[in-house]
Amino acid sequence: MENDHTKPAFPTIEANHFKDYSDPGMTLRDYFAAKAMQAIVDVGHSPELFANHAYKIADAMLRAREAS
């Protein structure tokens, strides 16, 4: 079974039917990170700091999904 972070955030019916994620577009991990970024970004600080933190939050969200 694939890890959640490799699955597309917005899969098409065709991708689900054939399990072809060769071009998934935005992954679920990327989607979670983008949502987290909206909540934590602060002007005047390093963008890299917030990007790294957003992916840590996304990874935590993926782990929480697996635990439930």
Image (cartoon, rainbow, N blue to C red):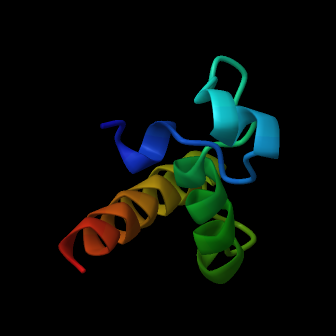
Residue 17 in which image quadrant: top right
Residue occupying the point 58% across, 30% down? 19
Residue 25 in which image quadrant: top right
Residue 21 in which image quadrant: top right
Residue occupying the point 24% across, 80% down? 68
Q: In the orientation shown, which residue stands out farthest toward the front?
A: 17
Residue occupying the point 36% across, 57% down? 59
Which corner quadrant holds the N terminus? top left
> Exactly how many numbered labels are in the figure?
0
Instruction: Classify 47 as above or below 61.
Output: above
Name the side, left or right, on which 43 lies relative to 6. Answer: right
- The one of 39 and 63 positioned closer to us in this rendering: 63
Q: Is residue 63 visible?
A: yes
- The one of 43 and 66 positioned closer to us in this rendering: 66
Q: Which percent across, then down, holds residue 22?
A: 65, 17
Residue occupying the point 79% across, 35% down? 14
Name the side, left or right, on which 63 lies relative to 61. Answer: left
Q: In the orientation shown, which residue stands out farthest toward the top?
A: 22
Q: Is residue 12 visible?
A: no
Instruction: Classify 26 as above or below 60.
Output: above
Q: Which percent across, then down, holds residue 55?
A: 46, 54
Q: Which percent across, then down, holds residue 29?
A: 52, 51
- The one of 53 and 18 positioned closer to us in this rendering: 18
